[in-house]
Image (cartoon, helix red, strand yellow):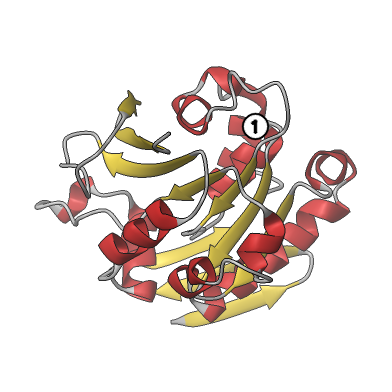
Amino acid sequence: MTLSSDHDKPLGFSADAGEITVDFVKGKLDYRRKFGGGKKQALSKAVGLHKSKQSLRVFDATAGLGRDSFVLACLGATVLGCERHPQVFAALHHGLQRALEDIELGEVLEDRLSFVNGDAIELLSCTANGVVSNFRPDVIYLDPMHPPQKKSALAKKDMRIFREIVGSDADQLDLLEAALKYPVARVVVKRPTHAAPLREGVSHSIKGKTTRFDVYMAQS
């Protein structure tokens, strides 16, 4: 993997499959922010933003390229994204700093989006005086690495590159178990539409075009 940096440009990753960048200012994310359907989109409904009368606090335990964290923050949630791969975290941090310096985005994201470098399972295990406990999340969001498709050409190019960089999430079930033990109102897991749930106990699911959000509600 090659890491390229320029403060005025997005931070990029180069792998055998190509290059990807973390860019919150321009491109697909900017388009989605403006025309993605607002709180009516499946992601918003899954975390409960469409019905919430106050700002929800979302811990994104698998931040990755930060796209869902960014969308949730733009929709009004306060988001803490966790990424354990140090180079990916560096790209997230760089991308966020560029976004905060943008006149329009800076006003939207200030105090709403932040990232931490660490292992989410370890962070969730510390329920007192830890990064997550101090953040006080209402929702934990997980987007673990999806199973590779049989025909790799069908997989999105950026996801093939990301998989090459970070590998597979072998401990994703352990992460879900840690999330379910944490005292939050709901845990949301993003899955391919036709994939089985990571674990039994799904309260309900919200389906998008190519993905599904399995929602685990806290037991009263």
Dot 1 crowding, Cα within 10 Å, few <14, some 14–19, many 20+: some
Is residue 50 shown left or right of residue 164?
right
Residue furthest to the left in view is 150
Please indicate, yes or no, whether residue 158 appears anywhere in the rendered image.
Answer: yes
User: Residue 219 appears at what percent x and percent y?
Assistant: 39, 37
Q: Position of residue 159 (x, y in %)?
A: 35, 56
Left or right, residue 76 beside residue 206 = right
In this rendering, the answer to whether 150 lies above or below 39 is below
Q: Position of residue 104 (x, y in %)?
A: 86, 38
Residue found 9% across the figure and 53% down from its top: 150
Q: Nearer the viewer, residue 39 or 91?
A: 39
Disc 1 marks which residue? 33
For the residue pair 40 and 25, the one nearer the viewer reads as 40
**Vertical placement of residue 68 versus 217, above or below:** below
- Spot occupied by residue 170 in the image (x, y as percentages of width and height): 25, 71
Q: Amino acid at mark 1?
A: Arg
Residue in the foreground of this view, choosing between 215 and 155 = 215
Work out which quarter of the rendered image holds the C terminus and state it: top left
Total numbered labels placed on residues in the image: 1
Residue at x-position 65% and y-position 71%: 130
What residue is at 66 percent from the left and 68 percent from the top? 131
Rendered residue at 54%/71% (across/down)? 123
Left or right: residue 33 compared with residue 188: right
Q: Residue furthest front?
A: 220
For label 1, the SS is: helix
The answer to whether 78 appears left or right of 187 in the picture is: right
Q: Is residue 23 visible?
A: no
Q: Is residue 162 above or below residue 101?
A: below
